[in-house]
């Protein structure tokens, strides 16, 4: 048994549950805030993952989007779970969402899996061993022309983060081919990892939003930093094909 295989397995079984729920014509949602919702699918998928991990790894801590943290803060291993990343898309029957599972050992993410159940695409990585999509190694875009760059972004629903996003959107869209908000941070990171997108900008993210996707992107060969500097920040990340990273940082610096 490997931790990576367990991350992949839990993402898969939760994703299969989401795929079945997605066919329902009556998806119920609760509003956690004016711009944040949760569905029974989020809760059900999270329960599936937590029950399996709790039974399999009794000494591990679990940090999940809907139910918070369980287990000791001094635990060597911590699982970060986003049972349904892209809830708004899911609720509106837009087939762009995923399950994200990451494992951290003593503060370092050692493996992660991001599963899109609609396309049956499993992105995964183990630290130091590269990144893969359905068994095939992936690598970032080799595009060197910002005018041809396709960039994606996610932000928290908070007013300040929304303001930052709008300013960045205006600046980046003037320089790049396009910038879009697709609604699923982990998938957007994975798409950057495999070259479908040239870069991803995350503003005000939670750890379960990006830990798995960030590892996958870094292991694929992407360059990564924070919104304000070269280091990864607690809740802001910039991930980009190496060939465009410095140029994108210059654009961002003019705004933030």
Image: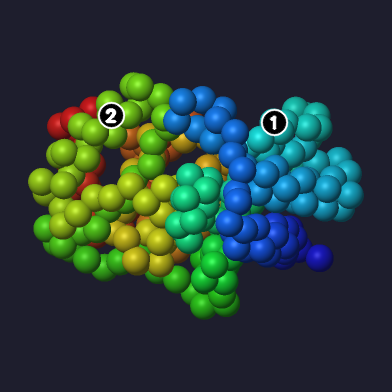
- Foreground of the two, 70 or 131: 70
Please indicate whether residue 50 sits to the left or right of residue 190 in the image: right
* Sequence-wise first label, 1 or 2: 1
- For the N terminus, the quadrant is bottom right
Q: What x and y, as percent, mark residue 129?
A: 57, 65
State the residue lying farthest toward the bottom. Answer: 136
| Residue depicted at x 60% and y 49% | 27
Q: What x and y, as percent, mark residue 36?
A: 50, 32
Please indicate whether residue 222 sits to the left or right of residue 28 in the image: left
Please indicate whether residue 51 sits to the left or right of residue 149 in the image: right
- Foreground of the two, 106 or 36: 36
Q: What x and y, as percent, mark residue 208?
A: 58, 41
The residue wearing badge 2 is 164
The residue wearing badge 1 is 68
Question: SS for tag 2?
Answer: helix
| Quadrant of residue 139 within the rendered picture | bottom left
Tag 1: Cα neighbours inside 10 Å, few (<14), some, or many (≥20)?
few
**Image height of 143 relative to 46, above or below:** below
Could you tell me if residue 20 is visible in this image?
yes
| Quadrant of residue 147 within the rendered picture | bottom left
Question: SS for tag 1?
Answer: strand
- For the C terminus, the quadrant is top left
**Image height of 203 relative to 134, above or below:** above
| Residue depicted at x 10% and y 46% | 174
């Amino acid at each position: 048994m490997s931790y990576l295989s367990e991350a992949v397995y839990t993402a898969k079984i939760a994703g299969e549950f989401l795929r079945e729920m997605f066919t329902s014509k009556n998806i119920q949602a609760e509003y956690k805030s004016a711009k944040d919702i949760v569905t029974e699918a989020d809760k059900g998928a999270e329960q599936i993952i937590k029950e399996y991990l709790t039974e399999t790894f009794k000494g591990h801590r679990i940090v999940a989007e809907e139910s918070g943290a369980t287990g000791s803060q001094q635990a060597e291993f911590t699982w970060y779970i986003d049972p349904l990343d892209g809830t708004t898309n899911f609720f509106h029957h837009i087939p762009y969402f995923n399950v994200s599972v990451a494992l951290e050992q003593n503060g370092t993410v050692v493996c992660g899996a991001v599963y899109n159940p609609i396309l049956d695409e499993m992105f995964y990585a183990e630290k130091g061993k590269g990144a893969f999509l359905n068994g095939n190694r992936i690598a970032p875009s080799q595009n060197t022309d910002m005018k041809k760059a396709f960039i994606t972004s996610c932000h928290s629903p908070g007013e300040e983060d929304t303001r930052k996003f709008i300013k960045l959107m205006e600046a980046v869209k003037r320089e790049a081919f396009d910038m879009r908000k697709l609604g699923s941070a982990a998938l957007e990171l994975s798409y950057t990892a495999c070259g479908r997108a040239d870069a991803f900008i995350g503003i005000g993210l939670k750890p379960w939003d990006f830990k798995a996707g960030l590892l996958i992107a870094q292991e694929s060969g992407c360059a990564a930093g924070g919104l304000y500097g070269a280091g990864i920040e607690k809740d802001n990340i910039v991930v980009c094909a190496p060939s465009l990273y410095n140029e994108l940082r210059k654009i961002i610096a003019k705004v933030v």
